[in-house]
Image (cartoon, rainbow, N blue to C red):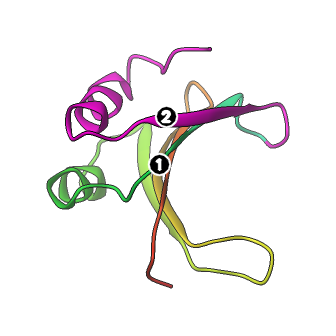
Amino acid sequence: MPTPCRHLASFYAAALSHGLAVTGASQGWSIAKCVFHFDGRLPRGLRAAARHASPPVSYYAVAKAPHTPAETGLYCTECGIGLSFPDSHG
């Protein structure tokens, strides 16, 4: 499995330390080189830190759509790597 970029490494490690697990990694289907998918919601403290992340890292939230579930996450625009967490809101 690929590894997260240095810009997302602390968020990745923090998610794991909160008991979340990576369920898979998507590659090559979007502008992202790789997106790591986690099995639970982005923890509250991590969500607050993510919302204030510095470039090249950005926080995103996507509402539920007919063919996709709601999710939140982080994306590194420099490296093309993302972290995705399911979200029950939206």
Taking 23 as reference, is 33 left or right? right
- Using the image, determine if residue 3 lies above or below residue 37: above
Q: Which amino acid does label 2 sit on?
A: Val
The residue under the point 77% across, 40% down is 31
Q: Is the residue marked by circle 2 packed among few (<14), some (14-19), or many (20+) residues within 10 Å?
A: some
Taking 32 as reference, is 6 left or right? left
Within the image, what quadrant is residue 37 found in? top right
Name the residue that disc number 2 marks: 22
Q: Can residue 35 be seen in this view?
A: no
Within the image, what quadrant is residue 64 found in? bottom right
Q: Horizontal and vertical percent for residue 58?
A: 43, 49
The residue under the point 38% across, 39% down is 55
Name the residue that disc number 1 marks: 39
Q: Which residue lies furthest to the right in this view?
A: 29
Instruction: Choose between 24 and 82: the one closer to the eye.
Output: 24
The residue under the point 21% across, 41% down is 18
The residue under the point 71% across, 81% down is 65
